[in-house]
Image: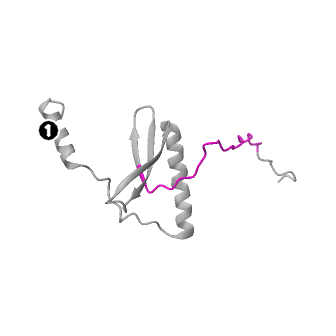
Amino acid sequence: MSDNPEKPPPQPPQPASIRGADYRIIFANHSTLRITPHELSITFGFVDEVRGGPSVQELATLVLTPYHAKLIALSLTETIKLFEQRFGSISTEQFTTPQIDITTLQAAIKKATANGDAD
């Protein structure tokens, strides 16, 4: 055993975080995901159920590379795990999969089948 404990390797300096002039905090209770082979976009919105029925006011869209999206997903997973350890489980039972306009879906299937595009 040595009297000199091993020093951890020096860490690279972290970039300074500077808020841009357009920086703002938004509250979102709705999101829509879109993907391409090169990017993933998340549109955040606010569900307004007051003005004549539910509607979504889109607030901002975040476009990411798939690599960065995966890093964020891993970070969110770990953060939620820590949150639940501290404050208790977050139930998602009340939520369902996103609503699909069945008429539009049926029309797309019919069109694809008529064109020979469907398997």
Q: In this rendered view, identify the residue nearer to me: 84 or 59.
A: 59
Residue 15: in magenta span: yes
Q: Which image quarter holds the N terminus?
A: bottom right
Q: Is residue 76 left or right of residue 23?
A: left
In the rendered image, which quarter is residue 38 located in? top left
- On the image, the x and y values in percent for residue 117 come to 18, 31
Q: Is residue 107 left or right of residue 94?
A: left
Q: Which image quarter holds the C terminus?
A: top left
Residue sitting at x 32%, y 59%: 96
By secondary structure, the bulk of the magenta-drawn segment is best described as loop
> Which residue is disc 1 drawn over?
110
For this orientation, the residue located farthest to the left is: 114
| Residue 11 shows in the view | yes
Residue 50: in magenta span: no
- On the image, the x and y values in percent for residue 13 come to 74, 40
* Colour scheme of the rendered structure: one colour
Which contiguous range is marked in magenta?
A: 9-31
Provide the secondary structure element on which disc 1 rests.
helix
Q: Mark 1 belongs to which amino acid? A: Lys
Residue 112's place in the image compared with 89, above or below, is above
For this orientation, the residue located farthest to the right is: 3
- On the image, the x and y values in percent for residue 33 come to 40, 44
In the rendered image, which quarter is residue 110 located in? top left
Q: In this rendered view, identify the residue nearer to me: 89 or 98.
A: 98
In the rendered image, which quarter is residue 40 located in? top left
